């Protein structure tokens, strides 16, 4: 790359009779300031020429490569300008083809498809649960993905499991108000119990006896019971 001071000095000495940018009129415009101070970025071929003449110092290989790219881009720009109508029509056709393809685009919102490894342990557990519950039960798992703070770190440490417990508690305590009533997790979750056939007040009592089905590594520890928000369950 040409030295900015040397190349700028060489360009400044030739400013009177050297290259100047035209504005389209009969008079020549003053040299651009960037063209004077950073000639290798504006015109790499000119900077390379000054180095070859010994009027500037710098590396020739990067300037030669940059000059080639600048020459190719300049020719491409001139060709596009001469055939602007054709490029406009072709560009609109390509844009229209992509726009038509948007109709067939499928936005994936299922966390299981996005994050769960195919054939992994979580995938096998979900398939096992579906087989035992039955596909007709409309089972739709809600997943909570926990990643380590550092790449490659273990998520089965005491600190990570406590963080998992806190995050799961916060997620299970979410309340949503819709259709003029308040909804909680226990209103929507699957409960691994028998079908309730009672009516009235007994129906509500029996429903609260069964906990939500929550599968978590905390099931191996006493802290896993904290995820159930009820006061009395039929175990």
Image (cartoon, rainbow, N blue to C red):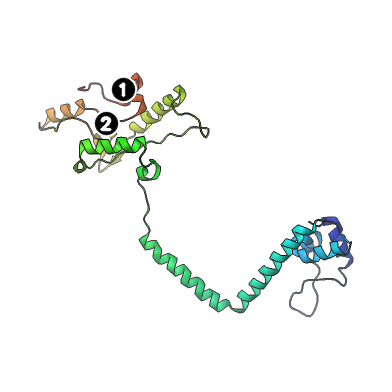
Of the numbered discs in the image, which one, if any, rests on residue 77? none
Considering depth in this image, is 64 or 19 the residue closer to the camera?
64
Asked if one can make out residue 173 in the rendered structure from this viewpoint, the answer is no
* Residue 51 spot, x, y in % from top left: 85, 61
In the foreground, 7 or 117 = 117
Residue 199: x percent and y percent?
10, 32
Please report the residue visible at 88 percent of the width from the left and 64 percent of the height from the top: 53
Q: Position of residue 15 (x, y in %)?
A: 86, 68
Mark 2 surroundings within 10 Å by alpha-carbon count, few (fewer than 14), some (14 through 19), many (20 or more): some
Residue lying at the far top in this picture: please name it: 222
Left of 104 or right of it: where is 75?
Answer: right
Quadrant holding the N terminus: bottom right
- Quote the CA–CA distance across marks 2 and 1: 12 Å
Q: Secondary structure at mark 1?
A: helix
Instruction: Characterize the local packing of mark 1: few (<14), some (14-19) or many (20 or more) Cα atoms within 10 angstroms.
Output: few
Q: Are marks 2 and 1 in contact (CB under 8 Å)?
A: no
Looking at the rendered image, the quarter that the C terminus falls into is top left
Quarter of the image for residue 193 reads top left
Name the residue rendered at 88%, 68% in the picture: 14
Identify the residue at the far bottom of this view.
26
| Residue at left offset 74%, top offset 65% | 67
Dot 1 corresponds to which residue?
Answer: 225
- Look at the picture and state if 165 lies above or below 133: above
Residue 62, image quadrant: bottom right
Q: Compared with residue 29, is residue 37 higher up or lower down, i.e. above or below? A: above
Q: Residue 185 vs residue 50: left or right?
A: left
Q: Name the residue: 89% across, 65% down.
A: 13
Q: Which residue is mark 2?
A: 213
């Amino acid at each position: 790359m040409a030295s900015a001071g040397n190349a700028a000095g060489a360009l400044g000495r030739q400013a009177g009779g050297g290259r100047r940018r035209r504005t389209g009129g009969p008079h020549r415009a003053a040299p651009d300031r960037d063209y004077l101070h950073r000639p290798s970025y504006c015109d790499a071929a000119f900077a390379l020429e000054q180095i070859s003449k010994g009027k500037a110092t710098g590396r020739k290989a990067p300037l030669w490569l940059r000059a080639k790219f600048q020459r190719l881009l300049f020719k491409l720009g001139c060709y596009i300008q001469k055939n602007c109508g054709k490029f406009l029509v072709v560009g609109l056709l390509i844009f229209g083809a992509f726009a038509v393809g948007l109709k067939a685009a499928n936005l994936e919102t299922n966390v299981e498809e996005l994050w769960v490894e195919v054939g992994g342990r979580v995938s096998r557990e979900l398939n096992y649960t579906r087989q035992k519950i039955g596909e007709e039960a409309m089972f739709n798992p809600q997943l909570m993905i926990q990643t380590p703070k550092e790449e490659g770190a273990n998520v089965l440490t005491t600190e990570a499991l406590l963080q998992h417990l806190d995050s799961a508690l916060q997620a299970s305590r979410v309340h949503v108000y819709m259709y003029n009533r308040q909804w909680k997790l226990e209103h929507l979750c699957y409960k691994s119990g028998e079908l309730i056939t009672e009516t009235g007040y007994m129906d509500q009592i029996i429903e609260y006896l069964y906990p939500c089905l929550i599968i978590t590594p905390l099931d191996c520890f006493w802290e896993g019971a904290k995820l159930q928000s009820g006061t009395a369950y039929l175990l």
